[in-house]
Image (spheres, rainbow, N blue to C red):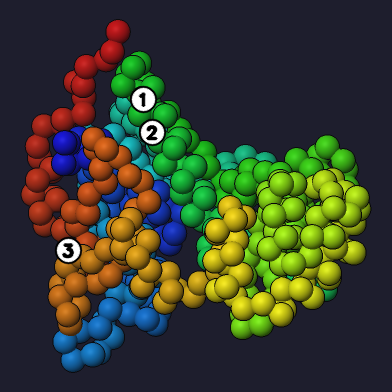
Amino acid sequence: MHTQGPLAGVRILDLSRILAGPSCTQLLGDLGADVIKIEKPGAGDDTRAWGPPFVEDESGNATGESAYYLCANRNKRSVALDIATPEGADTVRELLAHCDVLVENFKVGGLKKYGLSYDDLKDQFPRLVYCSITGFGQTGPNSDKPGYDLLAQGYGGIMSLTGPADGEPTKVAVGIADVMTGMYAATAILAALRHSEMSGEGQHIDIALVDAQISWLINEGTNYLLSAKLPVRRGNQHPNIVPYQVFETSDGHVIVAVGNDSQYRRFCDLIEAPELGHDERFATNAARLKNRETLIPMIAEKLRLLARNSLIAGMEANSIPGGPINTLRDVFNSDQVAARDMKISMPHPLAGGGVVDLIGNPIKMSKTPVTYRRPPPVCGADTKAVLDEFLNQPADRKHRPVAS
């Protein structure tokens, strides 16, 4: 088994902060890449201050490390470096001689004044994969506008679909536009590294939060493109499948996710409403979509009389998709999370208990599994070690063999 991960030997210089870029580089770090995170001296990544909650020391006092920062910065080394100074920018270039990838999320053109734009670096580092993450991309009429997750969710349309029909447009509760942008960026970086290995040629990757958000409109976006009809907010209902939503039971809420007509008939039998399974108004999914407003209240009336756990057990016994709506306590205390290693603990120098709990990586690989080698670093913790390791050393990225 390759214990260092499939990306062992790949080195990334990470000039990003907040969430999209850091989530990208954490993912690559989990897969074995050596990630060097460049941070502003004395301040570091903005998210370090985005709390509470913060890591607590032995006396129960809050430190300067927020849970938000911890969520996207493991498997990295932190170097405190002021790139706004000529000396700092020169140090970045010296480090790049030892790196394969640069990731940044400055405003369009923001690194040009330091001589660190792609155009500034591409001739000196022809193999470099340079990934830029912005709100709207490097081109287009909005390229100069800042990028924030909430703005991307609004501009890209997902908020027009999310929330109750009679309520206000609602964002997804976490920074999903940032996270998905980070995933697209990681995928693009891996593809560009493959090209670089084959050809010896690096390239510039241009990833935008709004583009990424539009891409995952998926079926709702394509529904609109095909029909020219604006979708409406349906709360927890599905635009193309019925019944596929949340229902109230006598003691809580339950998810019913009926995916085909045979499941629907079994569901009707389970809730002692077989007549709904044979009614021609509801016999097919297309018919149920057409008559949704008639069917759903009838199902809801039945389910309000049933106990949640009893209904879930009945659906499982009859191969009807459905399940609970867990709180985060339910999630992280579950046997499933334990079996899948989705909660991990890592040592942390500021934690009173010596460790911090983090969310695990969902990728499971049989030969080259993810590894958790470094906890999220304190700002500048690795400055001396990294600079001693690489500065004034011969570049080790100039003579990598090119595949024929």
Name the mark on residue 169: none
Residue depth check, mark 2 versus mark 3: number of the one nearer the observer:
2
Q: Nearer the viewer, mark 3 or mark 1?
A: 1
**Residue 35 at x, y = what percent?**
26, 48
Tell me what residue is drawn at x 24 percent, y 72 percent. 356
The numbered dot on residue 194 is 1
For label 2, the SS is helix
- Left or right of 15? Residue 314 is right
Element type at mark 1? helix
Q: Amino acid at mark 2?
A: Leu
Q: CA distance from mark 3 to mark 1?
A: 32 Å
Disc 3 marks a residue whose amino acid type is: Ala
**Where in the figure is residue 278, as x and y percent of width and height?**
85, 53
Between 329 and 9, the one nearer to me in the picture: 329
Image quarter of the C terminus: top left
In the rendered view, tell whether residue 122 sits above or below residue 289: above
At 44% from the left edge and 37% from the top edge, which residue is drawn?
187
Q: CA distance from mark 1 to mark 2?
A: 6 Å
Relative depth, front residue between 55 and 63: 55
Q: Is residue 210 positioned above or below 66 on the image?
A: above
Q: Is residue 159 visible?
A: no
**What amino acid type should be assigned to the residue bearing mark 1?**
Arg
Residue at x-position 74% and y-position 53%: 265
Q: Earlier in the sequence, mark 2 or mark 3?
A: 2
* Contact between labelled residues 2 and 1, with CB atoms less than 8 Å apart: yes
Q: Residue drawn 71% across and 46% down? A: 262
Residue 263 in percent (x, y) is at: 68, 50
Pointer 2 residue = 190
Please state, as top left, top right, bottom left or bottom right, where the N terminus lies in the image. top left
Number of the label disc, if any, that sits on residue 381: 3
Image check: 378 left or right of 122?
left
